Amino acid sequence: MIKDRPGFDLLSEERIKAALKTDLLGNRVYAFWSVGSTNEFAYRRALQGDLEGVLVIAEQQTKGKGRKSRDWDSPFYKGLWFSLILRPDIQSSQAGLLPYLAGVSVAEAVENLLKLTPDLKWPNDLLFQGKKFCGILSEVEFENGKVKFIILGIGINVNQKPDEFPEQYQHQATSLRQNYNSRIDRAELLAEVLYCLEQNYKSIATYGLNEIVSKWKKRCPQFGKEIVIMQDDVQVQGQFVDIDDNGCLILQTESGATKKIVAGDIRF
Amino acid sequence: MKPKEIQKLIELVEKSDISELEVSRWGRRVRITKSSTVSVAKSSADSVVISSTPPPIRPLSAITAPVASVETIEIPAPAKAPDQNVFEVKSPMVGTFYRAPAPDATPYVQVGDIVSQNQVLCIIEAMKLMNEIESEVRGRIIEISVENARPVEYNQVLFKIEKL
């Protein structure tokens, strides 16, 4: 666990708790110097009965996870690498809508704090000029046809300079600092992300998840447009017309038929 | 003979047209007989029967060591297995079905594998939301109903497991 050290912008539990302005999210904080994967740790804690709102954050992940076990580069001190435990009361069939909650909330937080408007890219990347600065990977556990818990894993490149990304990612990765042109206080940003997330999460009880999806669509420049999706070696093309009740992308192909997409990389 | 080796032999017999296989190694012989009468498989313990019988006449080929015993394994013909003994694992959500944690990784399970309760069988992914599906029963995988990396619907059958 990290202890606070004056003069260093380290994300200690004390520092995080002092910055937070939420009731639920971050009610318990696990702050690490280094951990394999915050998602994995949070998942284990949730299995052991930890309540919702738990925040697991690390200055560095040694085995940060991306899709299909791809690596997610999470270097020491440069970003926000964290996971949250949520226990929403929703059906398993609707679980696919929950990741949108995270995407929308990070976008809103960046806008509130830095006055920058990032783009959302399906299924859940955040970008500036086509370069990614935030990725979201979630894991869910079901019980009796309902969500038992979900781990929202969020990785945000905050203070990296262009040459601090591994060479193979430099053309496709960016950080908030590169777009804001100044160093960013990570604790303040974390507090804003959790604040937006908590507001949106609480709104589900009243407005349902469809309201979140509507917000998401407005922030996605490809929505309504002609897109190409790569699914392994297969390419599908059509108009991005909707996101359905399960969270799937609905593509209308040239023939007028609709196709449901659950995974893939959108090409510009 | 190690349980894993015996399990492999069972798989071999199951997949083939032969009804009986006898293998001897280190003085021990294992005979696997495919049974057509499934009525014996009424309780979970009955679906695989391992019984030791007194050593029969020693075959000429078995020259390595004295034969201690013969293990006879009877397995019910899978096609005739009663339905109540087969557990269907269904998808809890719409998504893509993955048999392994990464494209180049070994699949979690294969047909014929004995799985324990809570053992991971596959991953369903949708919108970068992952769900590891675990077996709710102890049993043998008798069918993997979906090809790797294929889309699956809510409630679609993914695996059939013969309960043990």
Image (cartoon, rainbow, N blue to C red):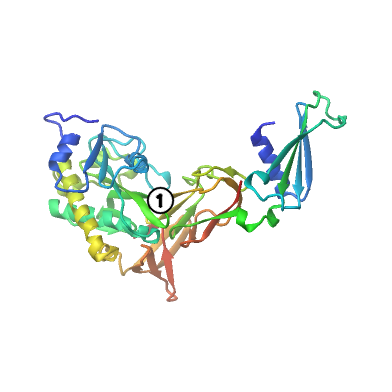
Looking at the rendered structure, the secondary structure element under dot 1 is strand
Residue A71 drawn at (x, y percent): 38, 42
Which residue: 41% across, 52% down? A143
Q: Quadrant of residue A34?
A: top left
Residue that lies at the very extreme toward the bottom in this rendered image: A256
The quadrant of the image that shows the N terminus of chain A is top left
Residue A78 drawn at (x, y percent): 23, 38
Marked residue chain, label 1:
B
Q: Nearer the viewer, residue B107 or A30?
A: A30
Residue A127 drawn at (x, y percent): 26, 54
Query: Circle 1 sits on which residue?
Result: B130
Q: Nearer the viewer, residue B46 or A263?
A: B46
Indicate whether B105 appears above or below B68: below
Which residue: 36% across, 43% down? A43
Residue B33 drawn at (x, y percent): 76, 44
In the drawing, does residue B10 fall left or right of residue A24? right
Which residue: 43% across, 47% down? A68
Indicate whether B52 appears above or below B122: above
Residue that lies at the very extreme toward the front in this rendered image: B43
Q: Is residue A219 among the parts visible in the rendering?
A: no
Q: Amino acid at mark 1?
A: Met
Q: Quadrant of residue A122?
A: bottom left
- Number of marks in the image? 1
Label 1 CA crowd tier, 10 Å (few <14, some 14–19, many 20+): many
